[in-house]
Amino acid sequence: MALPPARILGIETSCDETAAAVISNGRVIESNVVASQVDLHAQYGGVFPELASREHVKAIYPIVNEALRQAYVDISEIDAIAVTQGPGLAGSLVVGVNMAKGLSLVAEKPLIGINHLEGHIYSAWLHPADVTPPQPPRFPLLALLVSGGHSELILMTDHLAYQRLGGTLDDAAGEALDKVARLLDLPYPGGPSIQKASTSGKETAFSFPKAMLEGSWDFSFSGVKTAVLRAVEALQAEGRPLPIEDLAASFQAAVVDVLVEKTLLAAQKYKVREIIVAGGVSANKRLREKILAESKYPVHIPPLALCTDNAAMIAAAGYFHFIKEDFSPFDIDVLPNWPLSFSH
Ligand code: KG4
Ligand code: ZN
């Protein structure tokens, strides 16, 4: 069944990226503009919330204009405005939501508040404008959502219908990578730094615990994080130099192996047709290679630019709400702790 055409403007300001994008029909990237604050926050070793919201205020207007300009459209040619309503940093979310409300009011376009996690999942539907559209993901599917704030396994039986099978009981995968990177004196953000250091390290140098938590679809990464800390302390007590690359490689392997093994077990148990891997940690090379090599199900992993925070994914999710006329009232507020609903 052909879906109705629509062009959605997406806005994302949940953390340290100010982003806007124009997406048609939930899939085609007409523009995708991201202003990252990562260099600014790197000096603090993590996101500094007050600084993040101030930067969003400065960047939001030019970024939205640039997204419209690059798509060669005027706001009047947009069918709806989708914006990340949560989860995320309250002071950052509010900048995007207020911008979206202003545009919605002035241009008389519907407003759609999007869950950031839902956005990450919908990054799997996106493709550039100049390619033959690839096959979209097919239901039922399993989404492994791994980011700085979340590590979740989600079963989707249809568009916008989510069943959370499990999630992290402590640190998110990205959070654990960021914390261990800090411990090893590697620059923020930690995920890419750990990946880089790992390339010249030996995965088998250290045997870090892999918490499989059998019998549940939950994850736990605090044990492996503490194990790295203990190994570092033991080496330091002996006055030995830290084998940073070996520590990074062994830790990365422990995290990735658990993510991949549990995802494949859940895919089998729930008899899904396909798998989606999304969120910032899905940019990880070892994770991508391992799941693609070991899965007997087709795996959708977005290209690197769509793994980390962007507004294209928010507009893609917005489209599927738009076609159901699932609009948000004008008085929506930000939802910093919004979980992905069980179903819509
Ligand atoms: O989705 P995202 O951009 O923001 C959140 O919604 O949290 O994810 C950010 C997380 C950070 O923890 C970062 O270290 C991690 O994604 N990350 C990576 C890689 N690139 C980003 N982790 C592992 N390998 C990477 N290449
Ligand atoms: Zn994210």
Image (tube, rainbow, N blue to C red):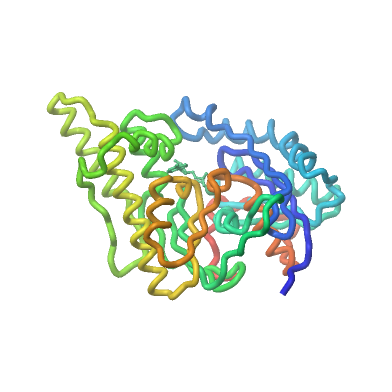
Q: Is residue 47 left or right of residue 240?
A: right
Q: Residue furthest left?
A: 238
Q: Residue at x 36, y 35 (%)?
A: 181
Q: Residue at x 20, y 40 (%)?
A: 205
Give whichever of 285, 76 is nearer the camera: 285
Q: Is residue 54 left or right of residue 235?
A: right
Quadrant in which the N terminus is drawn? bottom right
147 lies above or below 44? below
Q: Is residue 138 left or right of residue 58?
A: left
Q: Residue furthest front?
A: 132
Q: Position of residue 118 (x, y in %)?
A: 58, 58
Q: Residue at x 37, y 58 (%)?
A: 260
Q: Position of residue 158 (x, y in %)?
A: 59, 72
Identify the image quadrant of residue 36.
top right
Q: How many marks?
A: 0
Q: Position of residue 67 (x, y in %)?
A: 74, 41
Q: Position of residue 34 (x, y in %)?
A: 64, 38
Q: Is residue 148 in sight in this rendering?
A: no
Quadrant in which the C terminus is drawn? bottom right
Q: Is residue 241 in sight in this rendering?
A: yes
